[in-house]
Image: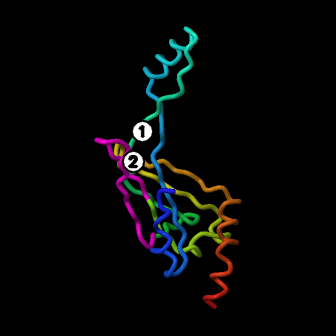
């Protein structure tokens, strides 16, 4: 829903694969303890989560080869009157990821620890689905 107004922006351009990176939501230790204490008194409070750290940058790999994004967006998202958080929205050539990769991985860096990457391997079924979804566009390019 956050990008619902982007349709007009992207519909007239060649197809791209958009990868959105949103910071993790976590509950602090003391908040968890307080919720547990309240629960022992019969009060059920839902988890109170906050964003762990903002997005800094991302690197994507097809096998061991780094894939350069067409455009790496870094978006500021307002989460309250006084707080903002950064998200990533990276545009890639969809043919950069497919069966030829063997594996696809994303390395995500946070604002809190900008030199320490969190590596996520993309499920091979997801890579295959992306490859199939963009097949009609590859056929048009021939």
On screen, 88 above or below 17? above
Along the line of sight, the residue nearer the viewer: 100 or 47: 47
Q: Are marks 1 and 2 in contact (CB under 8 Å)?
A: yes
Q: CA distance from mark 1 to mark 2?
A: 9 Å
Locate the C terminus and report the quarter of the image it occupies. bottom right
80 on left or right of 118 = left
Q: Main secondary structure of the magenta part?
A: strand
Q: In terms of sequence position, does the residue under pointer 1 or pointer 2 come before the other?
A: 1
For the point 38% across and 44% down, the residue is 79
Whole-percent x, y for residue 69 in the image: 45, 69
26 on left or right of 62 = left
Which residue occupies the extreme bottom position in the image? 142
Q: On the image, numbered disc 1 is attached to which residue? A: 52
For the point 42% across and 38% down, the residue is 52
Q: Which residues are magenta?
A: 69-88
Whole-percent x, y for residue 41 in the image: 55, 8
Q: On the image, numbered disc 2 is attached to which residue? A: 110
Occupied quadrant, residue 140: bottom right
Residue 86 is covered by the magenta coloring: yes
Whole-percent x, y for residue 131 in the image: 66, 71
Q: Secondary structure at mark 1?
A: loop
Which residue occupies the extreme top position in the image? 41
On screen, 121 above or below 41? below
Along the line of sight, the residue nearer the viewer: 109 or 72: 72
Whole-percent x, y for residue 129 in the image: 69, 65
């Amino acid at each position: 829903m956050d990008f619902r107004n982007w349709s007009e922006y992207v519909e007239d351009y060649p197809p791209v694969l958009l990868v959105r990176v949103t910071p993790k939501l976590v509950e602090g230790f003391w908040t968890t303890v307080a919720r547990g204490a309240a629960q022992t008194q019969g009060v059920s409070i839902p988890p109170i989560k906050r964003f762990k750290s903002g997005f800094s940058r991302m690197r994507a790999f097809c096998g061991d080869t780094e894939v350069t994004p067409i455009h790496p967006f870094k978006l500021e998202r307002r989460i309250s009157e006084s707080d903002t958080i950064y998200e990533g929205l990276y545009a890639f050539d969809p043919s950069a990821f497919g069966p030829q990769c063997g594996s696809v991985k994303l390395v995500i860096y946070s604002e809190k620890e900008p030199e320490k990457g969190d590596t996520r391997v993309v499920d091979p079924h997801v890579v295959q689905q992306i490859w199939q979804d963009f097949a009609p566009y590859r056929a048009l390019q021939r």
